[in-house]
Amino acid sequence: METKSLLALLFATSSWLMVSGTLSKTDAKKTHKTEVDSSLAELSVLDRGLVVSDPQWRDIVREEKRYCSHVKRTFQGHVLGFITPWNSHGYDIAKIFGSKLSSVSPVWLQVRRRGKNSYDVTGLQDHDPGWVKEVRKSNRKIRIVPRLLFDGWSYKNYMSVLENEDEIEELASELVDVAKTERFDGFALELWSQLGGNKRRELVHLIKHVCETLKAKRLDCFLVIPPALTSLGQPGMFGREEFEQLAPVVDGFSLMTYDFSSAGSPGPSAPLPWIKGCVLELSPSSQWRHKILIGLNMYGMDFSSQGADPVLGGRYVEVLRDLRPKLLWDDYAGEHYVNYKRNNGVKCKMYYPTLKSLFMRISLATELGTGLSMWELGQGLDYFYDLL
């Protein structure tokens, strides 16, 4: 989730994003009066015939805020949704669609090592008990499991902890105390990628101990993991051996199956064959596969010769509304994209999730018997949640 952290910084200061995506000078001539319908829908997006490979821009602009609140959840696997403080709409989404979520992971917390056998969990000022209460009203079974980032740790810090049982015990004890004091249901740990694939055996030992301690107190333990395969099809930083060792004690693995493409290699965010390959690489048999949570990106990427910029739903709808582009379907990846031109003449290709692309990924999760992990609630379009 280091990529997520980068995106977070970009989103937190996103005013530049709207400027860098300035539309072409002919936009004024293309302005139309398509009305945005924000009323609740009687029928789901499936029943309204909106989940198609050839959607029209006007249908997305008009319908994206219309969701069907009375349709019950149909997806059978675990659904984990991340929320960040810098995207307030995610808090609303968690309350509105709480009945379709199994767990919510607010991105609030960091754990820091202060010295020998001394740890401090920071970020608790972002904890909003009132919001948590509202989310629980929507789903009394929902679990609040804040993401816990191992932040500011030096290599020396890691080595001091990984090689010392007393340190690991103290760390686990601190997490239990925070969870009980703040009335959390557990944590989503993010620490694997920080060591770049090194010290795997030691990390497995640490995570096992922490998760076992949490579970002994009836607290959940999720683990954020990088893709099992790189974009070139090579083994990633977290593999089958680690998965099989940790699966008995980890409640869910938030698998980062997105950010497949980059500025140097523009393209889809998460090709379907790659997602499937990542899951099967970790779990060729189905014993623990239900604990894998396929990552769904609710953001998109805008590629040009000037680089790559993350795109949120509002920006995407703006491009559709003002430029009225044709949505093109990447059949191999199972994703839509649009081509457009900025006012400086720079050509752009924007990939962004659609109902069809998400439907196919949720269907894949059903086929494979996995759950889902959404990064992040509030970045996408409101009617996406009809699909769950």
Image (cartoon, helix red, strand yellow):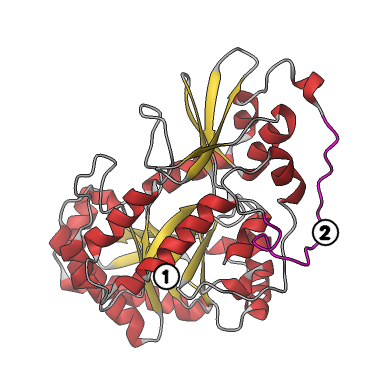
* Residue 37 is inside the magenta segment: yes
Give the answer, above or below, for where 388 lies relative to 262.
below
**Residue at x-position 40% and y-position 60%:** 294
Q: Position of residue 387 (x, y in %)?
A: 59, 63
**Amino acid type, residue under disc 2 in the picture:** Ser
Spatial CA distance of label 1 from label 2 is 36 Å
The residue pinned by badge 2 equals: 39
**Amino acid type, residue under disc 1 in the picture:** Phe
- Left/right of residue 58 with respect to residue 154 in the rendered view: right
Front residue of 220 and 63 = 63
Task: Give the mark nearest the N terminus, 1 or 2.
Answer: 2
**Residue at x-position 71% and y-position 51%:** 64
* Residue 131 is inside the magenta segment: no
Q: Is residue 252 visible?
A: no
Give the extent of the magenta segment: 32-49
Q: Position of residue 292 (x, y in %)?
A: 35, 67
Label annotation for residue 262: none
Could you tell me what secondary structure mostly forms the magenta stretch? loop
Q: Position of residue 181 (x, y in %)?
A: 50, 79
Q: Is residue 319 visible?
A: yes
The C terminus, quarter of image: bottom right
Residue, far top: 345
- Left/right of residue 132 with respect to residue 348 in the rendered view: right
The residue pinned by badge 1 equals: 187
- Left/right of residue 214 with respect to residue 56 in the rendered view: left
